[in-house]
Image: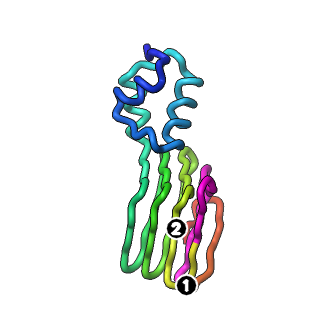
Amino acid sequence: MINLDFDKLLLELGVNLTSSAIVEFIKKLLDSNLGIERQELKQQLAAYINIQGDDIKAERIISFLSNSGFIVIEGSKIYSGEAILMYAGQDAKLTFGNNSVSETPRNRIDAGKGAYIEMQGEAGIKQNEDGSISFFTGNNKS
């Protein structure tokens, strides 16, 4: 069973304390299941991707697809020469924001400090090749 000394637990798991999103994720896990074992917590964290402070570039298309688990993008710059897709499936969540930029030659999404866009339950955003931005639900990612 997990000891509730939260700061010590995070250090033991090797969690980056600068990500507020991962701290909230772990707190929710612990609140919903106080009897969670350390190994189970590690498995839950394995489904969590935290992109923080990265520059991601591609000539054509960038896709962030979370079919299960969690993707959090914070403090990052994403640039694609054509299109960017961010999508979260039925049992997934994707969070973009907190000083992050997603940019193509024809459009830009700029989330300032503390601002977030969250997608979950088959929802997404696509920065299209023609400069438009599509918000959608369901499995239609085109």
Relative depth, front residue between 115 and 38: 115
Residue 136: tell me if it is visible: yes
Which of disc 2 and disc 1 is earlier in sequence?
Answer: 2
The residue at 55%/67% (across/down) is 141
Relative vertical location of residue 60 with respect to residue 24 in this rendering, above or below: below
Label 1 to label 2: alpha-carbon separation = 14 Å
**In this rendering, which labeled residue sits more in front, label 1 or label 2?**
2
Q: Quadrant of residue 98?
A: bottom right
Relative vertical location of residue 140 with respect to residue 66 in this rendering, above or below: below
The residue at 55%/78% (across/down) is 128
Q: Position of residue 107 (x, y in %)?
A: 57, 80
The residue at 58%/60% (across/down) is 139
Residue 118: tell me if it is visible: no
Q: Position of residue 7 (x, y in %)?
A: 45, 26
**Magenta residues (range):** 109-129
Q: Quadrant of the C terminus?
A: bottom right
Give the residue pinned by disc 2. 101
The residue at 62%/80% (across/down) is 132
Relative depth, front residue between 36 and 21: 21
Q: Quadrant of residue 91?
A: top right
The question of residue 2 being in magenta is answered with: no
Give the residue pinned by disc 1. 106
Relative placement, left or right, of 110 versus 8 is right
Q: Position of residue 63 (x, y in %)?
A: 45, 65
Relative placement, left or right, of 2 versus 132 is left
Relative vertical location of residue 24 with respect to residue 39 in this rendering, above or below: below
Q: Amino acid at mark 2?
A: Val
Q: How many marks?
A: 2
